[in-house]
Image (cartoon, helix red, strand yellow):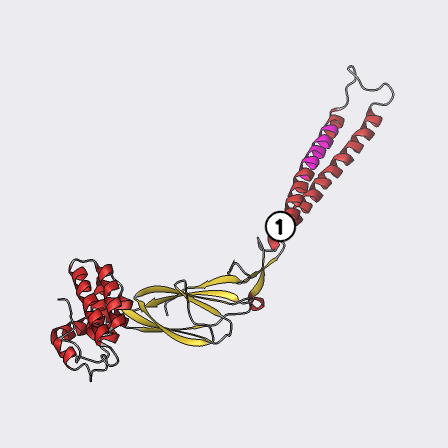
Amino acid sequence: MIAVVCSRAYADDAAAPWSQGVSAEHKAAAKQLLDKGNTAFLERRYNDALDLYKRAVAEWDHPAIRFNIVRCLIQLDRPVDATENLELALKYGATPLEDAVYAEAMAYRKLLANQTGELEVSCDQRGLILTLDGQPLDACPVTQQRRLAVGRHQIVGAKQGFLTKTMDVVVAGGGKEHVAMALLPLEQTAHVVQRWPSWIPWLVFGGGLAVVGTGALFEGLGAARMNDYDRALVRDCSGPGCGPSRPVPVADQQLETSARTYSAIGTTVIITGAVTAIVGGTMLYLNRGRTVYGDVTPVPGGGAAVTVRGAF
């Protein structure tokens, strides 16, 4: 059914509040636009019909014409706009509407009540900028209400020198949620973070030095054994000397082998320890503390962003 301005509304134009101050010319223009809108609606050209009904309301804001806007918005799946226009259509109750139209309007009110909810946002910090689903809200300090479609919505608060805050709000059908937005100064959220726990680079660096010390110990043992070998040669090979016919004693040869082994082990261990110490020193350099502001992401224009998740 397409609503039209009923004869009852025309009969009491002088007394009806929705007709006061509206000239006959404006009423006629509204009726013409209404008829065109009805045709578009029947042809399911809902965007065209909506535009025509809005133009008709601009000529004469009659509740019956306003209710046709509601019909279009429902067809276009715009429950928030439909709810707002429905309340305007029912501003004067059933009087300006035909009985069937009024019954339909009340049915739509129940239907839309489950598809929208209210959100109240308040803030006390002057200069704080709020956005709701990317659209700006009124300047703070303020308390403001918005009717929204059911589901998840996002509020962002930002202010120079403060930590930007993002809040997810779940709006339930027929419900009312409240969010109080307050930001923290950046200096209150600052803390130092490091790539690794501070003990790890020191452990690697200190461990490398300890390994170098162990390698030096092996080098010392190797040098001591080599000195023992040299003294043994002087003792055992003096006089006629040692050669093919008189080989170096086995014990002396073992001293030399042991000295060279200890020296090779010491050199390898020292190199390993030095490399480890260098790695530890590099880790100490990379692990220098840096200041961050909470669990944040920098945002253009200064400040940072922190995300707070949850339903309100």
Span highlighted in magenta in the image: 256-269
Residue 39 makes an appearance in the image: yes
Tell whether position 159 is magenta. Answer: no
Structural crowding at the residue carrying mark 1, measured as other residues with C-alpha within 10 Å and reported as few (<14), some (14–19) or many (≥20): few
Query: Which residue is rendered at x = 65% and y = 50% of the image?
Result: 285
Query: Which residue is rendered at x = 54% and y = 63% of the image?
Result: 303
| Image side of residue 93 versus residue 260, left or right | left
From the viewer's perspective, is residue 194 above or below residue 8?
above
| Image side of residue 70 versus residue 282, left or right | left
Residue 115 makes an appearance in the image: no
Nearest the eye: 188 or 259: 188
Where does the N terminus fall, quadrant-wise? bottom left
Instruction: Indicate the amino acid at tag 1.
Output: Leu
Where residue 30 appears, as percent x and y from the top left, is 22, 70
Q: Furthest residue to the top?
A: 245
Which residue position is annotated with label 1? 286
| Image side of residue 279 versus residue 260, left or right | left
Nearest the eye: 45 or 84: 45
Q: In which quarter of the image is residue 236?
A: top right
Where does the C terminus fall, quadrant-wise? bottom left
Where residue 306 appears, as percent x and y from the top left, is 48, 62
Nearest the eye: 68 or 150: 68
Where residue 230 appears, as percent x and y from the top left, is 81, 29
From the viewer's perspective, is residue 301 above or below residue 180?
above
